Amino acid sequence: MIRSRNYSVLLPISFAEFWRMTQHIHFADNGCWIWTGTRYDSGYGIVYLRKDQWAIHRLFFEMFRGHIPEGYVVHHRCKCPSCCNPFHLDACTQGDNVRAADTPAGETHYKAALTHCIHGHPLSGDNLYVFYVNGRPRRVCRACARRRTATHRRRCRGGRPCPPSPESANASAPREPPASGS
């Protein structure tokens, strides 16, 4: 989640700053203004302005629609996190934002829409395992889980401890000082 900040300290924005931002917007046929610049892993656009990092959808909301009340988040009605069209955005509470989502709580939109796992197994029926972490559902492909378990058991057969993974072995190994070049 993007932390709440006082975006009004940036306003007004100079024409040059605004023009620089518009160079990173693709105007899609569905009305979305897709931010093509830097993005968070979650897809939300980031703009670097006056030596600081700002969420572009929140900045555009404040520029075009007005102040975001304290404790409110910006909801994308279009369900596209990289959209910064201020008329696709609404200020609402986090609870309203979650209720407006078409997905189960805790799952991101793209995961909830998946019908198959990355290996092509269906995420439905007997092949779907749902478990809860902190009250939020997580979906797992049973076929892939069985394969992971079998691979783990093959590596650890006979009651011997599992060999360390390459990452953990490298992390715990003492480091040699760099060789001095002569």
Image: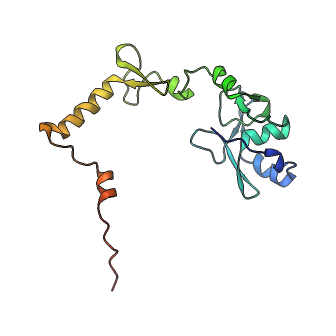
Q: Is residue 181 above or below residue 86?
A: below
| Position of residue 159 in the picture relative to residue 130 (left or right) | left
Provide residue 7's location: percent of width, then percent of height.
Answer: 79, 45
Provide residue 157's location: percent of width, then percent of height.
Answer: 15, 37
Q: Number of marks in the image?
A: 0
Residue lying at 66% horizontally and 21% vertically, measured from the top left: 100
Figure quadrant of the C terminus: bottom left
Residue 175, image quadrant = bottom left
Q: Viewer-proximal residue, 50 or 21?
A: 50
Q: Viewer-proximal residue, 161 or 29?
A: 161
Residue lying at 39% horizontally and 25% vertically, measured from the top left: 140
Residue lying at 28% horizontally and 48% vertically, measured from the top left: 165
| Position of residue 42 in the picture relative to residue 75 (left or right) | left
Provide residue 154's location: percent of width, then percent of height.
Answer: 18, 36
Provide residue 32's location: percent of width, then percent of height.
Answer: 72, 32
Residue 93, image quadrant = top right
Q: Is residue 111 above or below residue 12?
A: above
Of all residues, the one furthest to the bottom in this rendering is 182
- The colour scheme used to paint the residues is rainbow
| Position of residue 18 in the picture relative to residue 102 (left or right) | right
Q: Viewer-proximal residue, 3 or 63?
A: 3
Of all residues, the one furthest to the left in this rendering is 158
Figure quadrant of the N terminus: top right
Q: Viewer-proximal residue, 65 or 97?
A: 97
Q: Is residue 161 above or below residue 52?
A: above
Residue 95, image quadrant = top right
Q: Is residue 31 above or below residue 45?
A: above
Residue lying at 14% horizontally and 38% vertically, measured from the top left: 159
